[in-house]
Structures are given as structure tokens and as C-alpha cells.
Image: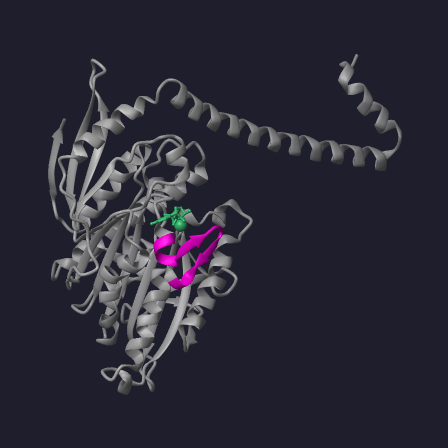
Amino acid sequence: RFPKQHQPKMASAQRGDGARKKNVVIQFEQIKKGGEDRQQRLKKTKEEKQVFKIRSKGNPHLEFGAMINEYRKSIEFHPLRESDPVKDYQIAVCIRKRPMNKKELNREEPDVISVPCKDEIVVHEPKVKVDLTKFLENQRFRFDYAFDENCSNELVYKYTAKPLVRTIFERGMATCFAYGQTGSGKTYTMGGDFQGKTQDYKKGIYAMAAEDIFKYLKSSEYKDLNLRVSASYFEIYNSDVFDLLANKVKLRILEDGDHQVNIVGLTDILVKSVDEVIELIKLGNISRASGKTSANSNSSRSHAVFQMSLWAPDSNRVHGTFSLIDLAGNERGADRTSANKQTTLEGAAINKSLLVLKECIRALGKKGSHIPFRGSKITQVLRDSFIGERSKTCMIGMISPGMFSCEHTLNTLRYADRVKEHRLIYKEQR
Ligand code: ADP
Ligand code: MG
């Protein structure tokens, strides 16, 4: 009665329970492994096919590439140079374009971003008319600084976070946000360059800021304040806070009578050198990457907050805090197509927090306006950074240069543009 392939199983069952179980387990492992292997193979062939399709047909995108190159001939490039002055902003909004990566180059994806000068970005958006003729919609944006693909982390730091170090010595709050799509370079910029899989923390904004904090501490101007430095590192996922310096233990947020927002029990460690800071970042990143549940295994779905605070010698009040934030990937907010409930919730939480964040920064720039910091955990935690005349903030919007990222890139640019209105300079079709 049974189909043929079931017969061997029956036979093993007759041999006794132990043997059968073992057999089933082995079979299951084999099936699982077979499935995984097949998936890997499928993924690989799919990628290969895509590349093949593009190559063999004569890459249809190459035409766009040629049009962009043609357009670029009309641009006079004057990129940011080391000698350009560093301006003092209460709110600075900057854009960084990363170089094309291997995958984009393999696919012969055109690079759709030009950085003509130190504060402008042009997006060459490929479009097709109803009659199938191709054209470019070129959109030019202005920001406080625009970093092209040749800029190093050091240069980006010099114009973004570095000018904020003094703020915390002057009893102010400083924040620096890395915003953008997953894969656009947020962690690279904040945490440091990658040499293969290992990250060179010394070349990240976290460590460079720490270095300058210790320099200021010893400077003739501030050494008499006898300040101490502490560091903490935590992650916000949905509306939960996890301590990255304490095995990702979940923490509560409480607001006291003075509307002071506290993360209860957050590890805050006194640090004496940049090396100690780097050790903490390493420790935190190990924690960040760990976690068995899907809920926290992917760092692109959470906001990471690294904070350094200054303390007066004989008081428990903070003198100033520098918060450096690697935000969750902004593409999830835009993803409404996902059928998975978990992903949809995550996306909604990220979307909401990024919208509230934008409003809070905008409010910082307008005296006396209402600050909607209660709208999300990240802004609640950073509440003190959005109030007071001594608060300064900078946002670095990261963008991927490839044509397939064009929509996300435009989203990032529009968001950055609204955080501090620079206004779109022009939009034209060619
Ligand atoms: P995100 O944190 O935004 O998801 P990552 O920082 O992890 O993105 O960067 C994605 C990949 O691109 C990494 O392999 C990183 O090394 C590389 N990358 C990002 N920015 C740059 C850059 N400016 N120069 C060279 N490589 C970069
Ligand atoms: Mg990242």
C-alpha cells in the first residue's frame, strides 16, 4: 500500500526504536544540509545568471552609464580639500558617498552619483519614457559638506564630529548620527575601516573622537577642570534598550521628576586612554553581533549608541556628553512589502524613530519649539541633546553609488535635506 520510497523506513523501524531514531536524525540532518546546499547553489546561479544576462545582452544599463559620463563632462569638479575651512554649525548635515563595491562593479552597475564640489551632490536618476527612450533626471542637492568616494574617515571626521568635541567641554551635549541604507558605510565611518573582516577601530569616528577628548582633557585650557571620562555602549531594538557592555542585558528607561531620562543600570565605565575606549568598543561589537534569535542577530535593524561623558571631580552631574550613533538601516522603514510580521514591526519601529529623530533635530534648530522626543526610544534617550543652546549635532547621510540603490539614495538625500533645509537646487531632464 505504501509508496515504494517509504519501504526502507518501515524496515528500519522494525529494527528497534534506537536505530530508527538515529536513522531519522541522520536523514533529517542530511535533508537540512541538502536544502542549505541547494539554496546556496541556487543563490549563486541566480547571481551568475544576472551577471551573464547583463553581459551577454550588452548591458542595457551601460547606455545610462554613457549618458552619465557625457553629463559629467559638463561638470567642473572642485572636491573638498584638506585646506578648506571647518565651519561652526549648531546643526550640520553632510553626505558621504562610498566607492563602488565589488558587487556593483561586477554587475557593471553605473555609478549614478556625482560630487561636483565640497557641498553638492548630483543624482543622475535613470528613467525610461513611455516610448522606451532613456533619459536622466538629474537632481542637484546642497548640504553643509559633501564627501566623495576619495574622502578618508579622517577627513570626514575633521568636518563632522571633530568640531563638536569642544562642545562637551563647554558643558554642552554633542551628537553625531550616521544615517543611510544598509551597506552604505555607516559602520565603516563610525567604527573604522575594514581590513578584510577585521575592523581598524583607530580609524573610526568613535576612536578619533575619544582621542580628541583625551587631548582636550590634558590641554592647558581644560586640565584644571579635572574632568573624568566615562563610556557606555548600548543598542536600541524596536523599543528595547540592550547594554552592549553587559552581555546585552535588557534595560529599562525611567523619567524622573525633573524629566531627566535615565537608562536604569546602564554600564558606564571610567576610561583613562583611547586604548581602553577601543577595548570597550570591541567588547560591545562582539555583543552586538551575537544573539541567537532573529530579533537581534542583525545589527542593521538596531540603533547603536556609543556615549562618552565628562564628569566633574566631586559631583555626580554630567559636565557634557558626546553621543555617536550608528542608526538602523533606513531602507526597512520604506519596506512595506514584507509579509513577515516581525520584519513589518521592525520596519515600522525604525521608520517611526527616524521620523521623530528628524523632527527633534529640526526643533533644536528652532528656538522655543516643541520637541517631540517622547515619540521614540532613541530620542527619549537623547532628550538632553535636543534641548539647550549648548547642544550641537551633526548628521552624516551615507549613500551607495550604484544605480540599483538610486531610490534609497534619493530617500536619504530628501531626509537629510529636511533635517536642515538646504533645498533641492535643481531637477532637470536630459
Ligand atoms: P552599513 O553599516 O551602512 O550597513 P558598512 O559600513 O558595513 O555599511 O559598509 C558596507 C561595506 O562597504 C563594508 O564592506 C565596508 O567596508 C564598505 N565601505 C563602506 N564605506 C566605505 C568607504 N568609504 N570606503 C571603502 N569601503 C567602504
Ligand atoms: Mg552597519
Is residue 255 at all visible to an observer of this figure? no
Q: Residue at x 29, y 38 (%)?
A: 408
Pick the quarter of the image with the C terminus. Answer: top left
Left/right placement of residue 79 relative to residue 345 reads left
Q: Nearer the viewer, residue 416 or 24?
A: 416
Is residue 35 at all visible to an observer of this figure? yes
Q: Nearer the viewer, residue 150 or 176?
A: 150
Above or below: residue 37 compared with residue 288: above
Left/right placement of residue 373 relative to residue 294 reads left
Q: Quadrant of residue 17?
A: top right
Left/right placement of residue 428 relative to residue 355 reads left
Left/right placement of residue 424 relative to residue 5 reads left
Tell me where residue 390 appears, x and y as whole percent: 18, 69
Q: How is the image coloured?
A: one colour
Pick the quarter of the image with the N terminus. Answer: top right
Q: Residue at x 22, y 32 (%)?
A: 69
Above or below: residue 285 compared with residue 228: above
Q: Is residue 196 magenta?
A: yes
Tell me where residue 73 appears, x and y as whole percent: 16, 35
Q: Is residue 401 magenta?
A: no
Segment colored magenta: 188-202
Tell me where residue 66 appears, x and y as whole percent: 24, 27
Above or below: residue 128 compared with residue 262: above
Q: How many marks?
A: 0
Tell me where residue 83 appears, x and y as whole percent: 18, 61
Q: Quadrant of residue 338?
A: top left
Q: Residue furthest right?
A: 15
Q: Residue at x 18, y 68 (%)?
A: 388
Above or below: residue 370 compared with residue 112: below
Q: Nearer the viewer, residue 55 or 356?
A: 55
